[in-house]
Structures are given as structure tokens and as C-alpha cells.
Image (tube, rainbow, N blue to C red):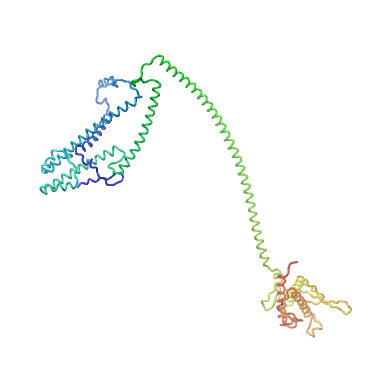
Amino acid sequence: MVSDQHICQECDKPVQISDSIRRLNTSQLGLLVNNELNKDHMKADLERLNELDPHDYLTTEKLELYSRVPKNTRPVYYKSYFESEDEEEEEEEEEEEEGRKKKKEEEEEEEKNDEEEDDEEEEVLEEPGETSNSNSNSDIHSYLVVNEDEGDEFKQLEPSSLEADDENENFEIKISSRIKTLNKIFKILSNTQDIDHPLSEDCAQLLLQNYQLKFDQIQKEKDQYLSFLKRLKVQDSKLNLVDEKGSMRTRFEDQELNNTLKQSLEEFQRLTKLEHERLRELKELEKTKADLDLQLSKNEQELNEITTKQLDGIIRLRNELQLNLMDKQSKLDQLKASYQLQLNHIDELRSFNIYKMMFNISLEEKYGTINGFRIGYRIVWPEVNAGLGQIVLLVVFLMKRLNIKLDTYRVVPMGSQSHIVKFTQQKDGTRSKKTLNLYSSDEFTLGRLFNFNKLDVALIALLDILAVIDYKLKEIDSEIELPYSIKNDTIGGKSIRVTSNSEWTQSCKALLCDLNWMLTFISVHTNDE
């Protein structure tokens, strides 16, 4: 079976062919196709004739005779280009009447063709056997397209299955030829227009709307042309170039012609004078424009120079300021770094105890040390003498910080040969002094028999001075108490005498512990003088 289903060339939707096209008979379809084909053939023939040279198929005498014949044989007539609207309306009415007549004739012809087709269908239904025989004599395009349902009804009327098969084949051939013809018609429509056919109803509506818009635009242009034509006619009536009958006037009266020429001449002179004035104004304006352009170019050049100079100066100043800023910034960064370094140094100094640095006392080992010098039993005497000298210096420092003045003692720091001067009040009111050496000198006195020597006496005097310092500290803070109490010649219950041997080492360590404690208290509770 041949499918008669068509698809819209724009939206690809299935398209149902209108019944008005389905009812066209074969002759009408062939007329549409052949008419377009004849036009194509005529156009091709004209193109081939235009390409031919007349000298190829005409003699020289005929060409000369043709050249002497006047080319324009139509009669010469005069017609006004400013025709009245009434004449245009009459022509339009005549064209409409002719169109109605042609349309009426076409409708009558279609009715006749439809009647002929109905008769043919009846003959086909009544005489199916004769239809196959008549196909050879009649044109195949003269048959109608029938639907598949109609084909089924037709099958019921067939007398035998063999004849039904033949008729189905014939109908398929007819439908195929009809579809091919419709495809040709759609192809012709597509070639003659800017859009492909067939179209669906929606696409056709869009196309009609587009054509309607174009028609409205053309109608507006027509109205504009008509208004312009009316103005031309009004101007024509003023010039009196058209007579009462509507034709161009060829004769004018002398007086009227003279008046018209005079008016035209005056108008021409006036326009000429006006033209000269406008030309003079134009020249003046052009001169002024040239002067202004020259002045503008000078001003632009001057502006560019000033701008360039100022810009150079600004750039130079910016570079100088930027360089100075970089120098200042570099110095500022250096000062900030130095300031931060000093702050760090100050923080270190704030956390640093100058007293501990001056008198570094250590009690962790067996012997107590002050600034690295050990004091105790079985230590060489030069080291012991140096340590005792540091102790004397620390005692003097504590007395100055506490503002202590002694009446009976005067401490003299002299390094490893430091000593204490002891003052004694005599009965006669005089004061005697005695030097007590705080260092060992291998000289022994008579007191050795009683287990005394000069170093022991000096150490006892040193304990007396520490007792005075302890009393002064208790005045500052009554709750203060030394780690090792001092009593006569003992400290922490240990004898300070050198002759006590091992106890002397422990008593020296206790002495250094009390001195370290006093130094810490003074560093916290006293201010710098």
C-alpha cells in the first residue's frame, strides 16, 4: 500500500490533506503540473534564444532590413501622469468584474468536472470488469483518490477474489500516481515561494499573519504615495496644466503665459538671489569653521604641551616623593626594629636581677660558693680568702642599701685581703681600734692556746654585723625571719670558727644562705637611690 501521509515541512507534524485538493480530478492536477512545466520550458527556450547569435541563422539582407524597420511601432499618445482618482477607481472596478467573471467560469468548470467524475465512479462501481479494459484507452490520471474504507466497501461489491486483487492493484496505482502528482504540486509551490509545502494549520496561520503584516506595511506605503499624489495634483491645479477634461493643456493664452513666465522668472530670480545669499553665508561659515579648526588645533597642541609638561612634573614629583617615602619608610622600619630590640632588651633587664648577677651565690654542692669561690674546710686558702672578700663586699652593699651605720665596726672590702676595723671605747673616753683580718695569714697568736686566732675573731665580728642587718630588716618587715638564726659565734647552731673543721664548712654554707636571702629581700623591698 502506498501511504498518502504528508508531513509539515516546518514543524514536522503529520498533515491531513484538505478535501478540496482530494476532490481534484486528474485533468485538473495535470493542468496545474503541466502549466508550470510549460512555463519552465518556455523560460528555457527564451534563454537559449537569447544565447544564440542572429548572424548564425539570418542572412545579411534580412538583418539590414530588420535594422531599417522602426523599433517603436506603437502610436504616440499623450497622457497625464496625474490622473484623477475617479479614473483609478473605474479601472479597479473593471479589474474586479473581470476577476469575478473568471472565478465564476472556473467554478462552473469545476462543477462540470465533478459531475463527470461522479458518472465515472458510478460506471466503475456498476461495471468493474470493464474498468480494467478501459484503463488502456483512458489516461491513468483521470481516476479519483479513494480512502481505504471506501476501498473496503468496494471489495464487498466484487464478484470474485481474483477481480478484487486486480482492482486493489489498480487503486494502489491510482493512489500512487495521485500522491506523486500532489508531491509535484507541493514542489512547485515550494519553488515559487519562500517556504516549503505542505504546511500544517498552525504554520499556515503564522504564514498568513506574516503576510498580513507585510500587506499592512504595503498598504501604509500606498497611502503615503496617494497623499503625495494628491499634493502633486494640487500643485498641478495651481499651475493650471490640466484642462476641464483632465488632459494636459497644450495651448495657453499669451497674457496667461506671460503672467506665468513672469511669476516663474521672479521666482527664479528670488531663488537665485537666495541661493547667492546662502552660498555667501556658507562660505563665511566655512571660513569661520576653518578658523575655528585652526584655533582648535592650536589649543589642542598647547593643551597637549601643557599637559605633557605638567604630567612630567607631576610624575617627577611623584617619583621624588615616592623615593623620599621609601627612605623614610626604610628608616622607620629600622627605628621600629631598633625600638623592638630595645623593648626586648628592657624586658630582659626587667626580668634580670642585677643583685644576683653581682653576687652569684650557689648552695647546691657540698660547699657554698659566691661568684665561683668555694668556702669551707680543706679548700685552699687563696680561694677561701677570695670568697671571704666577696662576702665582705656583699655586706658593705647591704649596709648601703639599708642605710646602716655601725659605731663599733667598719668593714673594709679589699678583695682577698679584706678586713674589719673594730672600735673599742676606753675608760678614759678615747677609742681604740683593732684590725681583724678576714683572710688566713699563717701567723698565730697566743690565743691559739685557747683555740682562737685572728680569722676566728674576724668571722665572729662578721656575724655581729649580720645580726645588725637582720635587726634592720625586721624593722622593715616584722614577720621576716632568717633561714639560719645567728647567735654569738654560731649560725644555724654551727660554729663559725675555723678550728671547728667540718662544722666550719656547714656554718659558711649557712652564712651564704642568709646573705642570699637578705639580697633577695632588698632587691624586692627597696628602691634605687
Locate residue 172, reporting x and y percent: 18, 45
Horizontal side of 340 relative to 467 (left or right) equals left
Is residue 92 visible in this depiction of the protein?
A: yes
Asked if residue 475 is positioned above or below residue 106 in the image, the reply reads below
Locate residue 319, reporting x and y percent: 61, 46
Which residue appears at 66% of the width and 64% of the height?
A: 347
Quadrant for residue 486, please give it: bottom right
Horizontal side of 351 relative to 469 (left or right) equals left
Asked if residue 232 is positioned above or below residue 257 in the image, the reply reads below
Q: Nearer the viewer, residue 3 or 426?
A: 3
Which residue appears at 36% of the width and 16% of the height?
A: 251
Q: Which residue is at the far top?
A: 254
Asked if residue 344 is positioned above or below residue 237 in the image, the reply reads below
Horizontal side of 71 relative to 358 (left or right) equals left
Asked if residue 36 is positioned above or below residue 348 in the image, the reply reads above
Q: Nearer the viewer, residue 218 or 402?
A: 218
Quadrant for residue 483, please give it: bottom right
Locate residue 312, reporting x and y percent: 60, 42
Which residue appears at 30% of the width and 38% of the height?
A: 193
Quadrant for residue 494, please give it: bottom right
Instruction: Give the total of numbered labels.
Output: 0
Quarter placement of the C terminus: bottom right
Locate residue 257, reporting x and y percent: 41, 16
Is residue 497 visible in this depiction of the protein?
A: no
Q: Which residue is at the far right?
A: 428
